[in-house]
Amino acid sequence: MSKIILTGDRPTGRLHMGHYVGSLKRRVELQNSGAFDKIFIMIADAQALTDNFDNPDKIRDNIIEVALDYLSVGLDPAKSNLFIQSAVTELTELTFYYANLVTVSRLERNPTVKSEIKLRNFETSIPVGFFTYPISQASDITAFKATTVPVGEDQLPMIEQTREIVRKFNTTYNCEVLVEPDALIPENSICCRLPGTDGKAKMSKSLGNCIYLSDTEKEVKEKVMSMFTDPTHIQINDPGHVEGNAVFTYLDAFATDEDFAEFCPDYKNLDEMKEHYQRGGLGDVKCKKLLLNVINKELAPIRARRAEFEKDIPAVYEILRKGTDVAREMAAQTLSEVKAAMRINYFDDDALIQGQQARYNQK
């Protein structure tokens, strides 16, 4: 069996360092590992419209932002198929068929759906499209026969629901058309969720606490130097706390021993810096300056690649068009197999047509 990855993002804004740590950097590694036969990376505009239906321009304008972020971090269209979800219409048809395999009560029990509904204040008025997202996601995954779906732990219930749909379909129609995917979760707990610059648990565009991959050096400096640290660390000599301190969380995610040798030779590594901070005598500004250098070092090649792609936006759309063509071809093949298993492939079933003709000939 081929090893296939499906992953993607909603185009509701530019991608930030939380996305980079949580998924983008890993995607590039997986892409370059040579361990997978096909990689599909989806710009999930149809899904984004389920809770932005009244603001389609927001989605339209951010397709290019997400595509530029993908290309700038190193996703290679020669190795990964980048495509736009809504342009693969076969996904919508698969979603419709799968909806018959899932009950309303099962969707209501999905922990991810419940938390997302609460987050968006949809408790009293849930858009059907948003409510049925697990079915749509199952369509996305199974259309490409993905064997691997990189997700955070909070998305595991969604993958399990996809697996249930696969089993129900294959059992109901006595076939092996659909493939059960496996979730691939981050190995490093730091990669699960990078906090916002304000110390909030989640980096979020709506909270305005993001460092974007496309931020300039000046913008990064403003954000890092105003970053949340330890409110009890008032004087330099005060003992400080590294737990819950956003600066040290970011250093955990990005800083290497080589960075200390280059930018902060007073310490051999992050552990030494943490010890000094915890016993007192180390100010927040010094830690932030190190972090600023580390982040800009990480973002420098990303900024450079983005600047090159920004020079030819039509070429970026051509990349998306070609990737979407590949995605449509594979999704169409899966849809054909699904319809054959469901015995609704009327025009392609010569045995059906000839058998019925023979029956009427006997009258």
Image (tube, rainbow, N blue to C red):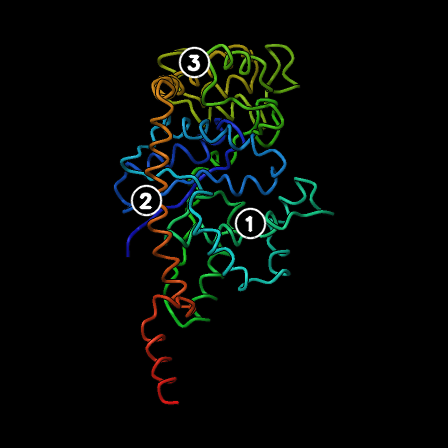
Q: Give the farthest residue toward the bottom.
A: 363
Residue 151 drawn above or below residue 200: below
Residue on which disc 3 sits: 293
Q: Position of residue 287 (x, y in %)?
A: 50, 14
* Quarter of the figure with the N terminus: bottom left
> Callout 2: helix, strand or loop?
helix
Residue 146 showing in the rendered view: no
Q: Position of residue 89 (x, y in %)?
A: 44, 48
Residue 269 showing in the rendered view: yes
Residue on which disc 2 sits: 326
**Image side of residue 202 versus residue 72, left or right:** right
Residue 330 drawn above or below residue 305: below
Per the model, the C-alpha gap separating discs 3 and 2 is: 40 Å
> Callout 3: helix, strand or loop?
helix
Q: Residues within 10 Å of mark 1 (few under 14, many from 20)?
A: some
**Are the residues tagged 3 and 2 within 8 Å (C-beta)?**
no
Observer-nearest of 135 and 291: 135
**Image side of residue 347 versus residue 116, left or right:** left
Residue 137 drawn above or below residue 259: below
The amino acid pointed to by label 2 is Val
The amino acid pointed to by label 1 is Tyr
Residue 150 shows which numbered tag? none
| Residue pictured at 35% horizontal, 14% vertical | 261
